[in-house]
Amino acid sequence: MAFDDQYRTYREVIAAAIPVLRPQVEVSTTRLEGLEAQVARLNPQVVISSQNRPPSLRPGVTWVQVPLEVGPRTEVTMETLLEAIDGVDYPSSPGALKGKQRS
């Protein structure tokens, strides 16, 4: 999970809520400046970020962009984030945001 430090409260609240709602999920947070290095190091299956998906990102990573501006077309709910996590088939490496599809 990566948001600019200006929005670190959003980042930390969402990161704390996900394991409560999905106990099998492990969440790691980072600043936007460190995002690509963290993704390379952790090999996550889901990334939640306020920035666009970088073109260099390996295929197979689910990217959920959370727009920070408010509007009817930009709203991303916790349900949306959980659906993305639930759609992941296999757990990834330790320390990465990971989820397993519910039956």
Image (spheres, helix red, strand yellow):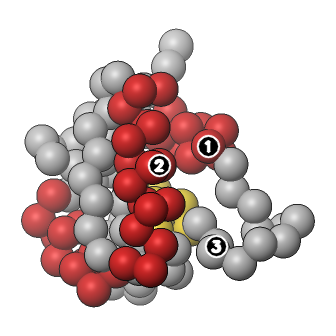
Depth order, front residue of 66/70 = 70
Mark identifier at residue 14: 2
- Farthest right residue? 72
- What's the CA distance linking mark 3 and mark 2? 14 Å
Q: Secondary structure at mark 2?
A: helix
Q: Secondary structure at mark 3?
A: loop
Q: Is residue 86 left or right of residue 26?
A: right
Query: Of label 3 and label 2, which has the lower sequence position?
Result: 2
User: CB atoms at circles 2 and 1 under 8 Å apart?
Assistant: yes
CA separation, marks 2 and 1?
A: 8 Å
Position in image of residue 26 (x %, y %): 26, 38
Nearer the camera: disc 3 or disc 2? 2
| Left or right of 24 in this view: 83 | right
Q: Quick check: can you spot residue 61?
A: no
For residue 99, what is the image quadrant? Answer: top left
Determine whether 56 is above or below 26 in the image. Answer: below
Check disc 3 and give the amino acid type: Pro
In the image, what residue occupies the spot 64% across and 73% down? 67
Callout 2: few (<14), some (14-19), or many (20+) C-alpha neighbours within 10 Å? some
Label whose residue precedes the other's in the sequence (3 or 1): 3
Examine the rendering and report whether any part of residue 82 can be seen. yes
Amino acid type at circle 1 is Met
Label ID, residue 78: 1
Mark 3 crowd level (few <14, some 14–19, many ≥20, 10 Å Cα): some
The image position of residue 22, as x and y in percent, is 42, 26
Reading the chain from its start, which is encountered first: label 2 or label 1? 2
* Mark sitting on residue 67: 3
Task: Name the secondary structure under disc 1.
Answer: helix
Residue at point 49%, 60% (across, down): 10
